[in-house]
Image (cartoon, rainbow, N blue to C red):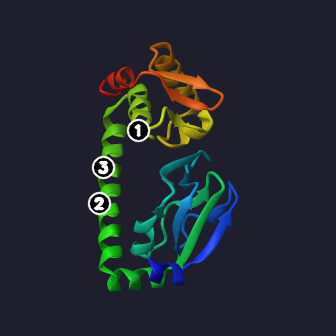
């Protein structure tokens, strides 16, 4: 959309950059073109977890921008990213003026809310192996590589310890559901993986 392009500015940001610390009200909206951004939260024990993750192309952390209060989570880049930035106030005005943008954002917010509800159910009801299997099965459905980061990074997504994730992956690997490669976690047998996810 030409109107959107004219109101944004380009940004290229290195991996590991803190975009916004927890407790800071968002000043801009990130239209993520490529790369990955995560929401971060540090526990009282100093462990960092990632309750949300965005891969481009998408709009990052829309709910925090629209809420307007200091969010409990921060934002940082997991990979190098390319994005366009739009001031929060302009974004809100754009939602009021442009029906197509408003429709897109509302639909995505609904999907995010339902995804968050599913994660809450998983945390409350599923054992660690099933949680990891479920999460992996939902990633990159058209590609064999489900995760390209380290196991330590993967542990931050469901909020589990690295040891717990390591044991879960070992079990999935032994069952032939996944393969641990230097390039990431490969889904070797999606049917077997889904069997673990259903436990």
Q: Mark 3 packing: few (<14 Cα in 10 Å), some, or many (20+)?
A: few
> What is the CA distance from the residue labelled 1 to the residue labelled 2?
21 Å
Q: Earlier in the sequence, mark 1 or mark 3?
A: 3
- Secondary structure at numbered mark 2: helix
Q: Estimate the x, y position of residue 47 in percent, counting from the top left.
A: 60, 45
Q: Residue at x 65, y 61 (%)?
A: 18
Residue at the spot 45% in from the left edge and 14% down from the top edge: 175
Of residues 160 and 154, which is closer to you in this image? 154
The residue that label 2 is drawn on is 110
Q: Which residue is mark 3?
A: 117
- The residue at the point 36 percent across, 80 percent down is 95
Q: Does label 1 or label 2 sit earlier along the sequence?
A: 2
Is residue 62 shown left or right of residue 78? left
Looking at this view, name the residue that lies furthest to the front.
Answer: 2
From the top left corner, tell me how far across and down residue 1 is, in percent.
44, 76
Residue 41 percent location from the top left of the image: 54, 54
Quadrant location, the C terminus: top left
Q: Secondary structure under badge 3?
A: helix
Q: Mark 1 or mark 3, which is nearer to you?
A: 1
Mark 1 touching mark 3, by CB under 8 A?
A: no
Left or right: 73 with respect to 18? left
Q: Tell me how far mark 1 sits from mark 3, CA to CA.
A: 20 Å
Classify mark 1: helix, strand or loop.
loop
Q: Write down the residue under mark 1.
A: 141
Q: Residue 184's x, y, as percent?
A: 59, 32
Alpha carbon of mark 3 to alpha carbon of mark 2: how far? 11 Å
């Amino acid at each position: 959309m030409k109107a959107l392009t004219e109101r944004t500015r380009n940004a290229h940001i290195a991996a590991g950059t803190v975009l916004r610390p927890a407790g800071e009200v968002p000043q801009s909206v990130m239209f993520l073109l490529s790369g990955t951004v995560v929401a971060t939260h540090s526990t009282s024990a100093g462990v960092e977890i990632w309750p949300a993750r965005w891969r481009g192309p998408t709009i990052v952390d829309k709910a925090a921008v629209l809420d307007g209060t200091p969010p409990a989570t921060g934002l940082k880049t997991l990979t190098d990213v390319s994005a366009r930035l739009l001031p929060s106030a302009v974004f809100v005005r754009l939602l009021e003026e442009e029906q197509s943008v408003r429709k897109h954002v509302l639909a995505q917010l609904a999907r995010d809310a339902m995804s968050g509800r599913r994660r809450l159910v998983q945390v409350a009801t599923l054992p660690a192996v099933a949680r990891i299997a479920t999460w992996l099965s939902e990633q990159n459905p058209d590609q064999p590589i489900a995760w390209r980061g380290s196991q330590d990074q993967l542990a931050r997504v469901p909020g589990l310890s690295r040891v717990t994730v390591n044991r879960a992956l070992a079990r999935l690997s032994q069952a032939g559901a996944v393969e641990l490669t230097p390039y990431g976690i490969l889904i070797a047998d999606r049917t077997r993986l889904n069997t673990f996810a259903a436990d």
